[in-house]
Image: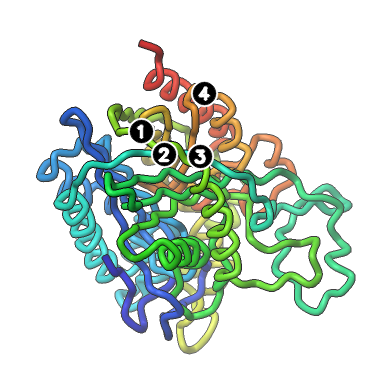
């Protein structure tokens, strides 16, 4: 289902800046697949949006699941996280700020309700269409390794702190301030293919992990590299095949190669490259009927971090001076940076006082001997790799940004170096121990669902 926004809709993925959509570079979609075996159904819904919040996920599940015979725990709702798309739900500021955000500036909180309401309805339609077109299929699963397209984005400087390198422009000597990149990427290209009994492919679940920020920060609507990958695969295989991309853990991964002074920022190039790799994987597949479907959801309470005393005092001073957004320009197209950060920091404090913890939904779907793991928020690549290494499944593919948004999930070792992903903000609010808590619980769930009979 097409969920391309109309002109003027706010594009998420930036902070404190209004990005009204001007032109459509490529369309956005809600894509769904429903599988059934032995009377049990699972569903996978991928949305070309930046973020999906718990409220929107709940609305989709409530509208679709009972009617379609899918347990709510068996429906994975995933945002591909294009930074050139809208969001479903507010995620940039705590709800306590709703009363001070002007009605014509909803975008400050990250989302516009009119678009979210419409897109939620379209997402349900996508699930309806998938459930109404069930047919016998066989499944084949295989992976390749392709590390050309993703790069760790936390660059360590001489003083031990971290900064994020952007796409290089007119820098023939490269970023000479970089000593090394802090961590790895996950180079696995995962392919789960569903084949009709006629031999034609019906759908593909494609898995890779990288921030979709090629087209950002322009005012162009784009599904970025996930959309380009899916579109190129569909062009090659035919329009009766539905490729669905699940973006993996990439909280610390960008497509910009900081070591290549001649790098060109092109989401379609990345899409073509991943499609080439996909074609090679498809040649190796062995298919068998889908006989085993299972699922499990575990909600893990994760503490919200305590805001640093000096940082909280600063945030309170800023907000006492300006309780409502302080504009950076006369057009009200951007918010003063200090105000936005102060509101974000104070929001963490308010959430901690009000809730104390976040209920983190770990979701595992089993399709034969393959695990599809849903992890909310933006886990670092290391977490995805660790989950895969601990998994008893033959193949384990991970989708991040599922079901609700909790911000970044760095490694504990990353916090002393600081950086965008670690410094206390509303998008970086969990305790450093969250990484280990999630890894432990996810491993337990995988062990439970793949326990030998």
What whole-number distance in Å separates the C-alpha atoms at marks 2 and 1? Answer: 7 Å
Circle nearer the N terminus (4, 1): 1
What whole-number distance in Å separates the C-alpha atoms at marks 3 and 2? Answer: 7 Å
Circle nearer the N terminus (3, 1): 3
Instruction: Say how many tags the image has.
Output: 4
Residue beneath disc 4: 440
Give the SS element for disc 3. strand
Q: Are circles 3 and 2 on residues that touch, CB within 8 Å? A: yes
Circle nearer the N terminus (4, 3): 3
Residue beneath disc 1: 288
Residue beneath disc 2: 140
What whole-number distance in Å separates the C-alpha atoms at marks 4 and 1? Answer: 32 Å
What whole-number distance in Å separates the C-alpha atoms at marks 4 and 3? Answer: 26 Å
Q: Are circles 2 and 1 on residues that touch, CB within 8 Å? A: yes
Give the SS element for disc 2. strand
Instruction: Say which residue appears at 29% left-offset and 53% top-offset.
Output: 32
Q: Is label 4 or label 3 in front?
A: 3
Residue beneath disc 3: 142
Query: Residue 313: x percent and y percent?
Result: 58, 52
Query: Residue 317: x percent and y percent?
Result: 55, 60
Q: Is label 4 or label 2 in front?
A: 2
């Amino acid at each position: 289902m097409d969920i391309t926004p109309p002109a003027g809709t706010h594009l998420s993925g930036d902070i404190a800046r209004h990005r009204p959509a001007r032109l459509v570079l490529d369309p956005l979609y809600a894509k769904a697949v429903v599988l059934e075996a032995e009377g049990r159904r699972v569903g996978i819904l991928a949305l070309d949006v930046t973020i999906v919040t718990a409220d929107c996920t709940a609305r989709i599940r409530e509208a679709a699941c009972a009617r379609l015979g899918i347990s709510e725990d068996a429906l994975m709702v995933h945002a591909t996280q294009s930074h050139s798309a809208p969001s479903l739900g507010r995620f940039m500021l705590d709800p306590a700020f709703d009363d001070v955000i002007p009605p014509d500036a909803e975008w400050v909180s990250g989302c516009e309700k009119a678009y979210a309401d419409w897109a939620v309805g379209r997402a349900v339609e996508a699930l309806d269409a998938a459930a109404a077109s069930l047919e016998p299929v066989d499944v084949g699963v295989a992976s390749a390794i392709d590390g050309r397209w993703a790069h760790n984005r936390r660059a360590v400087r001489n003083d031990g702190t971290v900064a994020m390198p952007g796409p290089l422009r007119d820098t023939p000597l490269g970023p000479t301030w970089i000593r090394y990149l802090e961590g790895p990427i996950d180079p696995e290209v995962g392919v789960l293919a569903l084949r009709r009994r006629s031999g034609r492919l019906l759908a593909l679940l494609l898995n890779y992990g990288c921030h979709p920020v090629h087209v950002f920060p322009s005012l162009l609507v784009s599904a970025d590299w996930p959309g380009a990958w899916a579109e190129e695969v569909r062009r090659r295989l035919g329009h009766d095949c539905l490729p669905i991309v699940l973006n993996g853990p990439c909280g610390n991964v960008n497509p910009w190669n900081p070591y290549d002074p001649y790098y060109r920022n092109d989401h379609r190039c990345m899409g073509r490259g991943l499609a080439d790799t996909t074609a090679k994987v498809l040649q190796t597949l062995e298919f068998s009927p889908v006989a085993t479907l299972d699922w499990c959801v575990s909600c893990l309470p994760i503490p919200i971090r305590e805001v640093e005393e000096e940082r909280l005092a600063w945030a309170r001073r800023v907000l006492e001076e300006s309780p409502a957004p302080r504009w950076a320009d006369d057009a009200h197209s951007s918010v003063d940076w200090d105000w936005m950060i102060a509101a974000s920091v104070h929001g963490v404090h308010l959430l901690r006082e009000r809730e104390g913890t976040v209920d983190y939904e770990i979701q595992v779907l089993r399709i034969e001997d393959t695990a599809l793991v849903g992890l909310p928020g933006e886990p670092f690549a290391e977490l995805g790799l660790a989950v895969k290494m601990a998994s008893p499944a033959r193949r384990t593919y991970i989708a991040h940004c599922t079901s609700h948004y909790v911000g970044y999930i760095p490694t504990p070792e990353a916090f002393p170096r600081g950086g965008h992903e670690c410094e206390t903000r509303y998008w970086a609010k969990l305790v450093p121990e969250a990484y280990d808590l999630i890894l432990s619980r996810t491993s337990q769930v995988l062990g439970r669902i793949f326990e030998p009979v």
